[in-house]
Image (cartoon, helix red, strand yellow):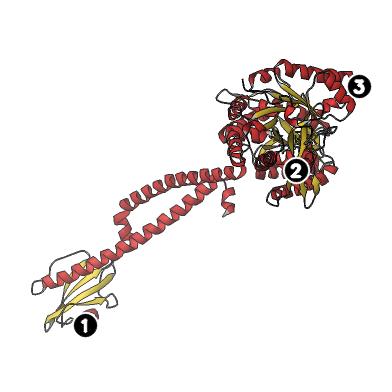
Amino acid sequence: MALIRYIPLRYKFWAVNGLAFISTLVLVLVAMGLELRSINDTRQEQGRELLRLWSGAQPLTLSGPLRPILLDDDDPAPWVQQLLAAAQADSTWLDASVAAPGGDTPALGTWVSRDEPGEGRAVIVQAMGYAEVFAKRAPVYAAAVFFLMLAILFGSQALIRFVDRHQRKLQTMAHYDVLTGLPNRLLAHDRLQHALEKIRRRGGYLAVLFIDLDRFKTLNDSHGHSFGDEVLKAVTRRLQVRCRSEDTLARLGGDEFLLILEQLGSAERAEQVANELLELFREALILPDGREVFVGASIGIAVHPGDGLTGDELVRNADAAMYLAKTRGRNGWCRYEPWLTEQAMERFELERNLRRAVERQEFRLHYQPLTTLDGRPFGVEALLRWRSSEHGDVPPDRFIGMAEETGMIVQIGNWVMQEACRQAQTWRKAGIDLQVMAVNLSPIQFLHADVVQQVAQTLRQTGLPARCLELEITEGALMQDTDHAEQALLALRELGVHVVIDDFGTGYSSLAYLRRFALDKLKVDRTFLQGLPDSASDAQLVRTIMQLGQGLGLQVLVEGVETEAQRAWLAAEGCRWCQGFLFARPMSATALAAWWPTDPPTQAIPDWQPQPA
Ligand SMILES: Nc1nc2c(ncn2[C@@H]2O[C@@H]3COP(=O)(O)O[C@H]4[C@@H](O)[C@H](n5cnc6c(=O)[nH]c(N)nc65)O[C@@H]4COP(=O)(O)O[C@H]3[C@H]2O)c(=O)[nH]1
C-alpha cells in the first residue's frame, strides 16, 4: 500500500483508465448476454402465443424468427415425424435438439401441439446470436461505452488528483511543522542522514547548529500561546534569511530549531554562521500586528566528523553545546566538547530527580538575615535548598536555571512563597520581630499571568501582613515585558507588597525603568563588593549605584558584606542596610530562631519599609 505513494501520477492515471476500459468491455458483454437471453425468452413466449392463436386457423404466412408449420402425419420427413411424436393436445416446447429445418439461422426450439389426429402444428423459434444482438444495438452500446469511458476518464483523473493531494497533505503533515512550514524532526533526521552519506563519499565538513530561543517560555506564559506562535514564525523568517539552498533549517519542537550546514569549507565556518545568526537576533522581531519583540538565542555547534559521526550523535552533542551556551549567559554559541556528554547525562538525571523533588519533599528553606550596618536584623531572605536523595545537596545555581527552563519553577516558587510566609507568620506569632520576609521570584513566575493572584492567595492563607512580604525580582524580569511588569508592580503595590530589584548592576541597570516602575528598593549585587575597599573602580561603582538609588528615592541594600573593612567603607558611604556572611550565613528555621537576638530589642530598626505616601 505504501508503495502506491511512490508511483507517479501519470502511471496511476493510465492504470486506472486501462482497468476501467476492461471493466467497460466486460460490462458490455454481460449486457449483451442478458439482452440475448431476454430476446430469446420473448421469442419463445411469442411462439407459444402464436401457436395458441393459430389453432384451428390456416397457417399464417409469416417470415422472421417465428415460423408456423402445419405438420402432416403422412409427411415422411424424419423431423416432422419426430415433432408429431412429441406433440400433445397441449402446446409443448421442444428445444433445439429436436431438429427442424431452419434455413441459415439455427433454431432455438419449437412449440408443437396436436389438435386432431393426423395433423399437428408447430412454431419454430429461431435463435438470436451475439453478432445479431450487437448489430442491432451497436449505436446504443457505442454511445454507452463512449459516455462511460468519458465519465471514467474525468472521474478517475479527479479522483487520482484528490487522492494525490490528500496523500501529499498527509506527507507534508508528517514531515513539516504546521506552524512554521519548516521540516520537522523526522525530515530533519532524514536530511541529516542524506547529508552524512554525501559527506562520507565526498569528504568535507558538515555542521549541526542547535538553536534554542532564550526565555521563550516566559514570553509564551506571559503573552499567551498565539503570541508565542507569532514569535516563532517571525524567528523562522529571520533565520531563513541566512540559509543557503543546500542548508536545512528545521523546527524540532517548542522553541528549538536545527540548522544543518552542508558542504562547509572548514569547521570554523560553522562558528561564523553562528555569529551571523546571533547578529540577526540583535534587531527586534516585528510581529504582524506591528509589535516589536527582542528574542535572544543560544546556539550549540557540532561538526562532523570531529564532534560526532552519526546524525543522532551530532544532534545530541549540539544540544549539549547549546546548553553550555545557555549556562554561559545565553545569547551566544558554544562548540561541542567531549566533557559535555557526561555533563548532559548528569543534567538529564538531575532534571529527572528535580521533577520528583517536590512530592518527595526534598526542598527546604534557609533564611539569611537582612540587617542594619551595625548588625541588627529586621528581616530575612528565604533561600531555597534542595537535598536530593540521589545527588545530595544541590546548590540553587545548579537547579534554579533548570527549573526555569522546564517550567517547574512556577510550582517550586509557589511552594517557596507559601512556606516562607507561613514561617514568617509563625515567627511573628512567637514574638520574633520580623519586619521583612524576602522571597526570590523567578522571571518566569513574575511574568506568569496570575502572579498577583498567587501572592494575594498566599497572604490570605498564611495570614502574613502584605507589608512584611518582599519580592525580589531581577532586572531581566522587568525588561522582558515592560507592560506586564508595570501592571504587575502596580497591582502588587496595591496589595501592599514591596518589590526589590535584586542583583542590581548586573543586568540592564536602566534608569528609565527605575523611574517608570512602581519600585521602592534595590539590592546591590554581591559581586561588586568583592573588590572593596581596595579596588577603586569597584568602590566607585558601588558608590554610584548607591547614590543613584538614593537620588531616585529608593532604599538601597548592599548584599555580600563579608569583612569588617567592607562594613566600615559602607558606613562611611552612608549605607544603612545590608546582608552578608559578616553578620550571618543562611540558616535553617530552627537555627534562625535561636540566632535572632532578643536583646537589644529590634524595635529601634530604621525605616527599611518606606511609609506609604
Ligand atoms: N559569597 C557570599 N555570598 C553571600 C553572602 N551573603 C549572601 N550570599 C549568598 O548570596 C545569595 C543571595 O541570594 P540571591 O542574590 O537572591 O541569589 C540567589 C537566587 O538568585 C537564587 N535562589 C535562591 N533561592 C531561590 C528561590 O527560592 N527562588 C528563586 N527563583 N531563586 C532562588 O539562587 C541564588 C543563590 O542563592 P544562594 O546560593 O543561597 O546564595 C545566596 C546567599 O547565600 C556573602 O557575604 N558572600
Q: Residue at x 25, y 75 (%)?
A: 100
Name the N-terminal-most of marks 2 and 3: 3
Q: Can you see residue 116?
A: yes
> Mark 3 is on which residue type?
Asp
Task: Please state the quadrant of the image where ligand 1 appears.
Answer: top right
| Residue underneath mark 1 | 86
Name the N-terminal-most of marks 2 and 1: 1
User: Alpha-carbon neighbours of circle 2 within 10 Å: few (<14), some, or many (≥20)?
Assistant: some
Q: What percent of the width, then of the height, locates residue 199?
A: 78, 41
Q: Residue at x 57, y 22 (%)?
A: 290
Q: Can you see residue 502?
A: no
Q: Could you say whether the residue bearing mark 2 is in a helix, strand or loop? A: helix
- In front here: 602 or 164? 602
> Mark 1 is on which residue type?
Ala
**Which disc is residue 589 wearing?**
2
The residue mark sitting in front, 2 or 3, is 2
- In front here: 59 or 304? 304
Mark 2 vs 1: CB contact within 8 A: no
Q: Could you say whether the residue bearing mark 1 is in a helix, strand or loop? A: helix
Mark 2 vs 3: CB contact within 8 A: no
| Residue underneath mark 3 | 534
Name the N-terminal-most of marks 3 and 1: 1
> Mark 2 is on which residue type?
Ala
Q: Quadrant of residue 279?
A: top right
